[in-house]
Image: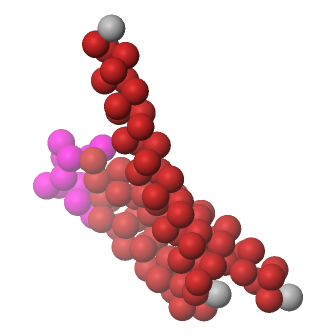
């Protein structure tokens, strides 16, 4: 049973990391209208960040953190790798 809870915590951590990153991208998408649309940009960050914090408190903390931090690390690594790849390809 403990293994199942840890697996669910890991998957939930990965999912909430993806949703939180998507909410952060929303601010970048709305930067042209951030003065008047700041609620639409900040609301999802608070929602998904709060959900992630609540889930971290209720679920298996270590597995949840591994899922959340692992997803964020992979996302950042892929973003950096893709930017380097395209920068090198544009030089050719």
Marks counted in the figure total: 0
Q: Tell me the quadrant of the picture where the N terminus can be found.
A: bottom right
Question: Is 50 situated above or below 29?
Answer: below
| Camera-side residue of 38 and 49 | 49
Where residue 6 sits: x, y (%)? 72, 81
Point out residue 42 in the picture as x, y percentages from the top left corner: 30, 65
Residue 60 placed where, x, y %?
64, 87
User: Can you see residue 19?
Assistant: no
Identify the residue at the far right of this view: 1
Q: Which image quarter: residue 7?
A: bottom right
Between 45 and 39, the one lying in front of the other is 45
Display colour scheme: secondary structure
| Residue depicted at 67% across the width and 68% down the height | 11
Image quadrant in which you'd find residue 9: bottom right
Q: Residue at x 28, y 13 (%)?
A: 91
Q: Does the magenta portion include 34?
A: yes
What residue range appears in magenta? 29-39
In this image, 72 relative to 13: left or right? left
Locate residue 61, reporting x and y percent: 58, 86
Residue drawn at the location 50% of the way across and 53% of the way down: 74
């Amino acid at each position: 049973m403990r293994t199942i809870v840890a697996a669910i915590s890991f998957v939930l951590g990965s999912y909430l990391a993806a949703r939180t990153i998507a909410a952060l991208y929303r601010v970048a998408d709305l930067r042209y209208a951030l003065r008047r649309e700041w609620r639409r940009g900040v609301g999802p960050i608070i929602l998904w960040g709060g959900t992630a914090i609540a889930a971290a408190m209720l679920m298996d903390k270590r597995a949840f953190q591994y899922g959340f931090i692992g997803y964020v690390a992979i996302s950042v690594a892929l973003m950096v790798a893709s930017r380097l790849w395209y920068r090198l390809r544009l030089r050719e």
